[in-house]
Image (cartoon, rainbow, N blue to C red):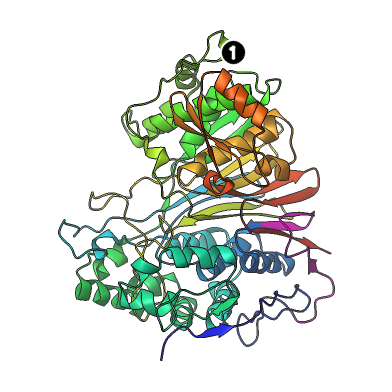
Amino acid sequence: MPSFSFLLLRPLPLALAGALLLGACATQPVVESAAPAVALTDPAAQVARSPHGMVASASSYATQVGAAVLAQGGNAVDAAVATAFTLAVTEPPMSGLGGRASTVIRTPDGQVYGIDGLNQVPHGYAEGAPAGYDRAAIPGVPAALGHALERYGSWPLARLLAPAIRLAEEGFILNGEVAGFIAGAADDLRQHEGSRRYFLKPDGSPYQEGDRLVQRDLARTLRGIAEGGVEAFYGGWIADSIHADMVRRGGFITRAELAGYEALPAILVEGSYRGFDLVSNYQPASGHTVIEALHIMEHFDLASAGAAERASLTGQAMQLALSDRSLRFGTPEESAARLTSREHAAERAREIRGPDVGEPVPAGAVDEGEPWWLRPDADHTTHLSVIDANGMAMTHTQSLGPAMGTALAAPGLGFLYATRLGSVPGSRPGSTISPTLVTDPAGRLRYALGGAGDARIITAVIQTLSGAIDRGLPIDEAVAAPRVHPAGQASLNVEQGERISWTDAEVARLRELGFGVEASTSGYFGRVHAVAVDGTTLVGAADPRRSGTAVGVRR
């Protein structure tokens, strides 16, 4: 019997917390059937406000699950873990159990902790494997989420997994974005038995918007984790199944590789921007690049600059930081300190040209060849941010690499393997993932954010923070403001979509400043999910470039 069933149904919205039953187990539901004291804000909204807890994510199902956990007394880590596992069900092109993750957590008393759950290259890796399976990397998402929960959570894993299990078992309604990504990868999915079974109809055609996607094998795998803990994934029957699949098809992930994998404490990087303190994760994540760019930008008066001038200075600062991303200065700790130092930023700031420094950008001075940050597989990955009523925050990004990852799914397990980005056995190749927390000059938590979209994660986070801090924009307006992305030393991609766009006059001014300008639609510029603290109110913002949501708790 196929593990996915196909039903053509109208989308049915999940009910709010007072009515929806997402059973955690027979005696411990995640959302009580009668809970008149708590409710959730509009589950369809992309902007929400509440003093009692807030979740922002890319899937309305996942966001509601996380907010329901907060409504029933779970903390930010509990809610984020439940949200992330649900995203692994409802956003399969972007994330899953076979993917990678990077996390930053802040406790109510201000302690900050980072988690490195990035994929690892198997030690047995060698060239010449059958097409596809040589690209599969050791998964990090289950370990990262389990580590976060063990260290800072308050609910049992089984309770938090119950909504994801139910959505996998009973199915969820595909929106146009998820259906579109699956359809775009259909040719690759058809090449592999498990992928065909899980993500295509019996006749080989892709699912459509409005279809219900049922994932019973994934539900079985999630149930195994709920019953046996994360250890069941890395050392139990799930690990045995992964090993057998790899042996059968020429891959390199073994039982020993899985048993040896662990989520690690991340190297934290710190900086500040106009008095606001920044913290994120260093390599293999890219928080240091976000901080470096903001340190460079701090040398210029962006608050009073015109839109085109601001874009020109920001674009150049981002280009310089992106080009530095993989530089090494001794140990990882020494490299992190150097790349986020004020001295390094001052050196790089002197290379920026524009009206603020009295010289035009030299026309046509573009880099030789295409920079790595313009690679085409940009529209992927997922991010969630959570802040609870006590001031605990978790900002978490998880990814399969390019959309649908390797397009390989092990028969019987239901999830896709992420793409290995690199070829050094035992390494955790670099990622553009950049979960970031920001505190205000008084030391109070102000923003939790991150993004999706390959290198556009970095530039989207940078521009969102600049909008909020330099221009004083509310977080939803900062997320929705039009963006640029560097395309070379004197060339910019500018956003010109139907709803979010630079004006023709601003684009003309950029050209006057000496920039080559290439217009791209909004989907090119990443998607940010953020939560801000505005006095006693939490404000959640889901990027309007996509269909994510923000949901808060109200009492």
Please tell me in which quadrant of the rendered image residue 48 appears. Answer: bottom right
Horizontal relation, residue 46 to residue 96: left or right: right
| Number of on-image labels | 1
> To which residue does mark 1 refer?
355
The residue closer to the viewer here, 44 or 522, is: 522
Residue 95 visible in the snapshot? no
Magenta range is 33-55
Residue 243 locus on image (x, y percent): 26, 73
The residue closer to the viewer here, 418 or 233, is: 418
- Going 59% across and 61% down the picture, which residue do you hit? 80
Horizontal relation, residue 552 to residue 259: left or right: right
| Vertical placement of residue 173 versus 301, above or below | below
Q: Secondary structure at mark 1?
A: helix
The residue closer to the viewer here, 218 or 307, is: 307
Return the residue found at the far top.
358
Q: Is residue 294 magenta?
A: no
